Structure formats: C-alpha cells, structure tokens
Amino acid sequence: MIGLRNSVTGRIVLTILSLLVLLFLALPIVLIVVTSFGSDALGSFPPESWTLGWYQQVFADDSKWPAALSLSAMVAAMTTVFSVALGMTAAIALVRSELPLRSAVYGLVLAPLVIPQVVIALGMFLLFEPASMLGSPIAIALGHTVLASPIAVMIIMATLKGIDERLEDAAASMGAGRLTIARRITFPMAAPGVVAAAVFSFITSFDEFFISQFLSSVDTTTLPVQVFNVLQYDVDPSVTAVAALLIAVAILALAVVGVVRRLGSDKQSGLLPVETGISAGGETR
Amino acid sequence: MSELHVMSTQQSPSIPASAVTGTGKPLSVTKVRKTYGAMAAVDEISMEIGAGEFVTFLGSSGSGKTTTLMMIAGFVEPDSGSIVVGGRDVTRLAPQKRGLGFVFQQYLLFPHMTVGENIAFPLQLRGVPKAEIRRRVGETLEIAGLAGFARRRPRELSGGQQQRVALCRALVYRPPVILMDEPLGALDKKLRDQLQTEIKRIQQELGLTVIYVTHDQEEALVLSDRIAVMRDGRIDQFDTPRELFERPRTPFVADFLGAANFLPGQVEDSTAEHVVVRLDTGGVLRARAQDVTAGTRVRAAVQPGRLTPVAPEAGFCTGVVESVTYVGTLVRVTVLPEGGTGSTVVRLEVPAGRAPYVGDRIGLSADPGDVSVFAAGTEG
Amino acid sequence: MAAPVLAPAEPAVATAPGSGPGGLRRRLSGRRTRFGLLNATPIVVYLLVLFVYPIFSTLLLSVEGEDGGFTLHWYADALQGTNLDILLATLRISAETSLLSLVIGFLLAYWITRLRPLWAGLVMLVVVVPHFISALVRTYGWIILLGDHGLVNEALVGLNVPGAPFALLYNEIGVVIGTTSVMLPYTVLLLYAVMRGVDRGLTAAAASMGAGRLVTFRRVYLPLVAPGLVNASVLCFILCLGYYVTPALMGGPKQTMVAALIDEQVMKDNQWNGASALGVILLLLTFAGLLLLQLFKKVGMARRNRGAA
C-alpha cells in the first residue's frame, strides 16, 4: 500500500513538474503572439485592450521591415533550391550507390551541424569580404546552404532508406530504364521527403541570424538581423508583431510538412522528418 | 476472408481467346558461374528449359538457387557462362533490357500506384496504346480472379491478393519467361496451397515458361514439370518430380525430397532386375536395379511413405513401434529396429486407418522400385 | 559406419553471401561506384569551398603576424586578461546550461515515455514546435517575461514571495534560463530517443526480484540510459559554446561569450587575426567534446563486449 501510494504521489509530482517544463517551452511563444495583438506591445500581460496596429505598422510605407522580409524570403528561396539540389544528389550517393570513403563524405556533410556557427560565420566573412560580396543575397544564401544542406541530406536519406530498393529492381525487371525508374518510382515516393527537406531548408535560412549578421551590409539586412538590431539598440514596438509573424511562418512550415506526410502513402510517422531534422545535429559519426 | 470470397465466385474464370497463346519461350543456361570472394555461389550450372515448361530450383538457403535466378533476371552478373532466352543471348544485358517477368517474395507493388496502375506500368513502358492497356489490365485481373480491384491501393489488399497483383503485373506484358523468387514464402499455408493451384492453372492456360525458386519441396512437387535440386552451387539432379522420387541420383536428393530413411548394409547380389542388400540389422532388402557390384558397402534409401507395415519377420526388418503421431489423415510412426544400435529409428507414414499401436512388434516392407542404394561414403 | 546405424542424413546446409533473399544487390559495381561519385561531387565540392576552405583560412589567419610571418601571439592574447575571463565565462555558462537542460530534459523525456502514444505525440509537438521557431524570437519572449514588470515577477509579487521582484534580466540567471529554453527541445529529443529504446520489461524484471523503485532506477534504468545522457549533455555543451543570440540579448557585460567577442573583434575592431584565434579555440573545444563522446562510446562498447564474453 505504501509502495502504491509512493508511486502515485511520485507520478503526480512528475506530471506537475513536466507540465511546468512544457509551460517553460511554450510560454515565451504564446506570450509573443498574445502581446502582438495588445495595445501596449512591450508591456503588461494580459493586454488591456486589443489592436492590429502593430501589424499595420510593420507593413506601413515608412517601415524598414518589408525590405528585410523580402530579402529574407529571397535568400531562403535560393537556399532551398541549393540545399534540395545538393541534398538529393548527396542522399542518392550515400544511400543508393557504392561510394568510396563513404563515411568520410558523410562526416563532412554532417560536420556543419556540430561546428560552432560563429566559426562558420567567421570563415564565410573571411571568404566573402575580400570578394566584396558582403550584403549580396547570393553570398548569404550560399552561407545558409552550409547549414541547411546537411538537414536536407538527412531527411532525404531517411526517405530513401524507407523506400524498398527492390521496388526499383521490380521496375527494372519490367523493362524500366534508370531514368524512368527515377521519374516514375523513386521520385514520386520520395516526394514527401523532398518537400520536407525544402521546407526545413527554407525555415533554416529564414530564421538564420549569425551568418546573416556577418554577411549583411548596413543597407541589406535580413529579417532576423533586423529583429536583433531592434532588440539590442532601438526599441520599436512593432518588433513584437514581426516576431509573431516569424512564429506563424514556422508553424505553417511544420503544418505543410505534416500534411504532405499524411498525403504521402508511406507509413512513417508524421513527425519523422522533424525528428530527423533535429537529431541531425546529434549525429557525430 | 475476401480471399476465399474471390476464390469461390471466380471458380473457373474464362480465359479470353486472345490470351490463350503459348507465350513462353525456351531458355538455356550454359556453364554459368558466380563467385563471391573465394566462394563459388553458383558453380558452372547448365540447363535447358523448354517453352511452356514450369521449372523449380529447389534447395536450402545458400544452395545457389536464388543467385542463379538473379543471374537469369540480370540483377547479378555471372563471372562466366551464358544465358540465352528464346534464341537471344542476354548474359550481359541489364535487367530492363531482357524483357523477362519477375515475381518477388515481398510482392513489391508500387505503393503510390493503384492496382490497375501497377499492372499498366510495364505496358506503358512498352508504349502500348491507352485503350489496349485498359483492356489488357482488365483481362489480366480477371484471369487472376481480381476483377474489380483495379482502383484499390496495394496496401488495402491482403497478402495473397497483393501477390496475385504482382503476378498480373509480371504476366500482363507476356514476357517470354517469368521468374518467381519464393513468391508464396510470406503467406500462410492455406493461402499458399490456394495460390499454388492458381499459378499452375494460369501457367498451363497461357503456356508460360516459369522458373520458380523455393526451399519447400512440397510446393516444388505440386507445381513443377521439372525440378532442379540444388546444393552448394551445383545441380544434384534435374528431373521430373516422379524421377526424383523414384530414382534419386544422390542421397541428398532422396533426403531433401522425402526425408528418406537411410539403412546401411552390403550388396549381396546385383542383377538386371534388382539389387539385393544385406542390411546391418540382419534382414535382406531388395532395391531397384542399379549400377553397383556385389560386396559394396551401401546405404539403402527409402521414403517414409513407401514403407508398409507387415507381420513381424515378414519384411526386411522387424521392430517395436516407438511412437505414433497423427498428422491429418496420415500417421507418422517410428519403429525401433531389432539388431540396430538402439539409438536410431526408422520412420514411416501410413494411412490413419492402418496405424499400429505403440509397443506393437511389426515388420517393415518396401517395394524394390521404391528403394535406391548409394555407395557408402557418397556425400549427403 | 561400422556400427549398424539407421538414421536419416542431415540435409547439407551451406551459406553463400548474396544468395539469400536479402542479398539482392546489383553487382554491377563499377557503374554503381561511378554513379555514387557523380552524385557525391556537388556537395563535396560545395562544402570544400564554402565550409572547409573558410575554416582553413581562419586557421592560417590565426597564426599570421602583422608582418605575415608565423606567430602565436593571437592565441596568447586570447588566453589572457579580459579575453580569458570571457572564455571562462563561456565555459561556465555552457556548463550551467547543459546541466540544467539535462536535468529538466530528463524529467520531461521520462514523463513522455510513460504517456500513452496519443498524448506522447501531442506533448512531443509542444517540444518540437518551439525548436523550429527562431531562437531570437523565443529569447525576445523571455525578455518580455523576465522584465521587472514581466509576467514572472508580477506573479511572484502577487504570491507575496519575499524579495520579489527579482532581477532576472541582464544577468546570468536570465542568460541561463533563456539559453536552456533554446537548447531544451534538442536535449529532450536526444534523450527521448534513448529512453524509448529501454525495454520496460527490464525494470519490471528488477522489481519482480524485489528491487525497490530507487534501486531499480539507479541500478537498472540509469545505466541503460547513461550513454544517452552523456551524449545529450556533451552535444548541448558544444552547441552552447558558440552560441550568441541569447547571451547577447539577455546578458550583462559579465555574460559576454566568445561568439560575442568574435563578433565585436570583426565588426568593431577589425581585428580578424584575434577573432580567428578565438574561433580556432572554440573549434578545438568542440573537437575535444566530440572526442570525449567517441571515447565514452568506445569505453561503453568495450564494457558491453566484456559483459557479453
């Protein structure tokens, strides 16, 4: 009886503590969303009255946000194209072929996930500064691709591993050539994974701060750099609305991945690419 | 359940006239060899397979049966030798250029396509016009008893149904030879029996050349015109089921096909009619005529099903019944022979009505035609 | 065969590689290798130019004197005075953060493994979604929360907690709270992956032998998840070492971390060599951490092997 009671209290304590931890994770995010609709964007909680004013300010004529937003979107789009292209070829090489020095290649691909970003950013700066490419969207996108492509590789690799290679053999036995197999069999089945890779590449770039910080110039800054500058130097209440928009973009991206996974015919769990994306950093091999 | 339903409503599906043509082509394999490291997985195998013939490669894992099949399919490249299908040398061709059909154990239906799309796929590759594709897909589904399944997704189907679809997909484009790699291995016994009958029926009606790989001797016996019993990368014997049963060429074949009893002894006489063997247990056993000389140490092989219980002392051996096990309508009996070491037994199978009791003293008899002898020391 | 033996022969079984049902592999290996090389080339070239080469040039710059010759004085600079203080602060804050992440991450991950699948999925969503929201944004959330008139202090004052309101911002408490919140999802996912793999039957077996809850936890559960704990905490520590955003926004002067120092030296002081030396030091610390992990893995493996033998 005593043991039972102990275990019940233990479980209750564990549950309460865990819920507090969840609150710890969720509270800052919820707070920003709520505050962005409050009349006093930096102040008390819950807000005394509600307004959409901050959002109107973000998109006002004299606002500096739209320029940063469009630069970020452009950079993220380029990063997505680069990462998915590199990710697909690399994943095919790593999963579907015989590769000499395979583990060395794999290690190189994953290395950017464990090397401190400040070191990567510094190296990039030393590369692009002499070429006077600071502030160039292409330079920033090339920099972001170093961080995004390992994630794309991981996700597409996981997807390819989930596709029975013998399905390709089956198609070959019926007379399908290499290109036909890729187009009719492998690609349609890998599509959800490729979409997930694209979405995660996009969001990695869209949210990236440190490399952008090093590669931005005074008049070309990405959205996160702009947000950082506002938070550190000049307080602009509309930043709360921008932060809320960044949250919305991230959630939207995750939702897209979830839906694509659901539509895809494979049985893998809905969160698989997300977990792969996260644990990507945990792979040290 | 739906499996049974389909079966009962499609008891004897009519085969459209256009499909009833002998599409199968002959195939010949000459001195094909494949080594992995120092190990010969397939060691200079040769065989001729006729058009419309159903041939099974039978062997345990590692016998080289699957490697041989993969070489015929083109997934594995032979080190030497040649493979000719319908007069065309395909030895060095990629799988997709050989035009053969392949049915895999794991079905391997494309999950992103419907059943109909799966079957249409090889036809699309061949540029068959749309209307023709639709007609042939429907026709093939009907042959396999799957009419009305075209719009389903593979994962909505049972294992048996999926394998029928895989079968359809392999035969819809009338390949000269269809290769099957343990296609029923993943199914349960009942379904397997059912599908064996189906496969055999379709093969015969369409005149297909089929090469079938299995480790299940029963399945091989039910399906095949001829069976290649394989071991260690070689063919022990390539013959009709009847020949394999009645005239096994090696102890391995005798054992693998029927779990034969091996009785050691010495040849007393060898004539044109039979071989007379004096068993170590004391009795005399007559075997079919074979090329052995008197005085040779041999092992006489006889299948459990070919032994008959008789009165004590009336047969070639007498012993006490040790166990009786009912297996359906058959009864497995083990007899401890007198004059033996006491640790070994003779196994026989008799119809349920004629089963002896444990402890009975019975004699054992066998028809000379059912007994083969192998010189002692023959491997296996 | 001297004794009269009546026995069925054993069927001969040999195994050859590549002939089983799983051995279906295209052996056209020359073509497969060429295909692999062709596909691996883009990313390898890309990373060599934009990742390896830049880091390599950082390395060169860090040992290059003003006259272009070899020198170690940038490292000497980095390891003394204020710079050394910053380096030590970085190590301290990283250690505090990874320890805190480990403890509360362990708690949460353990709880999730005990939930029903549906609930576990929902809770995982609360863990995963923040991970994909910009750290900058989450840090901003904490700045609002932890201010003198923020929600946390208001609540504490409302509860009449003595000493409230506390200074939670622009000091080390704030930095550790903020950074932990950023690192936590990562830690939880790493831990959860390990904990999910622990067979519940094992703890039940220990209990059936009379082991109490504490003994079971300490002698059975902890040893089983220990490799995961080490892995998660070291990786978390490594990630903290080079972290910039949260310490920069939530810390005071005493919480300046190496990343901020590098940023300052490059952007304000135009001191690339010194920044490079700091970068290389960070890199070496990272490698040391990864090496430590490999070492742990090897020791663990050796111990397990010995156990098996």
Image: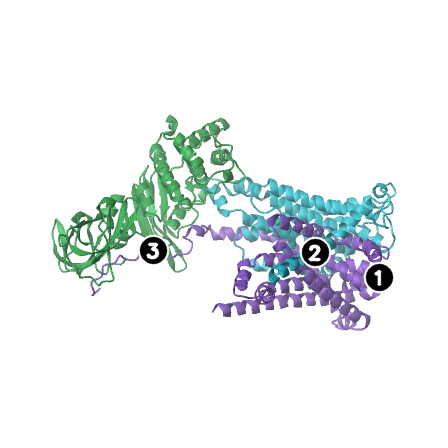
Residue at 62%, 47% in the rendered image: C118
Q: Neighbour class for label 1 at 10 Å: few (<14), some, many (≥20)? A: some
Residue C188 horizontal/vertical position (percent): 66, 57
Residue receiving disc 1: C166
**Image mark 1: chain:** C
* Of B201 and A2, the residue lying toward us: A2
Q: Which chain is cyan?
A: A
Q: Does A208 sit above or below residue B9?
A: below
Quarter containing the N terminus of chain A: bottom right
* Residue at point 84%, 59% (across, down): C160
How dense is the environment of label 2, judged by Cα within 10 Å: few (below 14), some, or many (20 and up)?
few
> Is residue C245 found left or right of C203 in the rendered image?
right
Q: Position of residue B126 (x, y in %)?
A: 47, 34
Supply the letter of whichever chain is purple: C
Q: CA distance from mark 3 to mark 2?
A: 64 Å
> Do the residues indicated by labels 2 and 1 lie within the same chain of the protein?
no
Q: Position of residue B155 (x, y in %)?
A: 51, 40
Instruction: Identify the disc placed on residue A16.
Output: 2
- In the displayed structure, B182 sits above or below C309; it is above
Chain identity for the colour green used in the image:
B
Instruction: Identify the subunit bearing mark 3.
Output: B
Task: Say what secondary structure mark 3 lies in.
Answer: loop
